[in-house]
Amino acid sequence: IMGCKNTIIPSSVESIERFAFSGSSLEQITIPETVLSIGDYAFDDCTNLNTISFEGGKIEGRFDFSNCTSLEKVTNIPEGVTDISSAFSYCENIKEVPDIPASVMNMDSTFYGCTSLINTPNIPEDVTSLFETFKNCERLVEAPILHEGIVNLSGTFSRCEALAEAPKLPETV
């Protein structure tokens, strides 16, 4: 796996284990709809990874693509994912992210250090904490709409120098 650059996970695979591709030289990965779980740090430190394609499906739990410094594009985030905390932290070349599925409940530090991020993803209704979610997103120009259920915004917009205006805070914060 370490020398492989482009990978299409076979449709017979249901789980990608913890650390499976961590630190590999992958550039592109296609994950089929048959994959139901991705272990912690499975793609952590894949510094050459630039494109992640999910073919649909429903992934339970959380996944992690942190420190994928060349990552530019994520086609979608599958339904069923509940935890994307730190999922894309330090992916400094990611400019845009797709809609966040309604199943997501944890987004702490999700885009921490994504210095090229410019678009504003939606925040699902069940998310209550955005601890450092957009910290160091230097090019983020617009804050997401923050719903009433959010109670923790600690460090969320720290060092977001391009924000045109301060986020409108919900009364629950």
Image: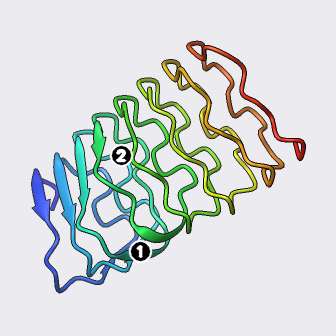
Give the SS element for disc 1: strand
Nearer to the camera, 13 or 23 = 13
Front residue of this view, candidates 9 and 44 = 9
The residue labelled by disc 2 is 45
Question: Going by the image, does 124 lie left or right of 119?
Answer: right
In the picture of the structure, the residue carrying the numbered disc 1 is 59
The amino acid on which the numbered mark 2 sits, given as a three-letter code, is: Asp
29 lies above or below 158: below
Foreground mark, 1 or 2?
A: 1
Comes first in the chain, label 1 or label 2: 2
Which residue is located at x 56 percent, y 68 percent? Answer: 103
Q: Quadrant of residue 15?
A: bottom left
SS label for mark 2: loop
Q: Is residue 81 visible?
A: yes
Q: Position of residue 88 (x, y in %)?
A: 45, 45
Which quarter of the figure has residue 41? bottom left
Residue 13, horizontal then vertical, whole percent: 22, 82
Q: Is residue 70 left or right of residue 116?
A: left
Mark 1, residues whose alpha carbon is within 10 Å: few (<14), some, or many (≥20)? many
Instruction: Tell me the quarter of the picture where residue 95 sits.
Output: top left
Question: Camera-side residue: 73 or 19?
Answer: 73
x and y percentages locating residue 91 in the rendered image = 40, 37
80, above or below 86, in the image = below
What colouring style does the render use?
A: rainbow
Mark 1 is on which residue type? Ile
Q: Residue at x 37, y 36 (%)?
A: 96
Q: Is residue 68 left or right of residue 156?
A: left
Label 2 Cα crowd, 10 Å radius (few <14 / some 14-19 / many 20+): many
Q: CA distance from mark 1 to mark 2?
A: 21 Å
Query: Residue at point 30% right, 78% down?
Result: 35
Residue pictured at 52% horizontal, 19% vertical: 138
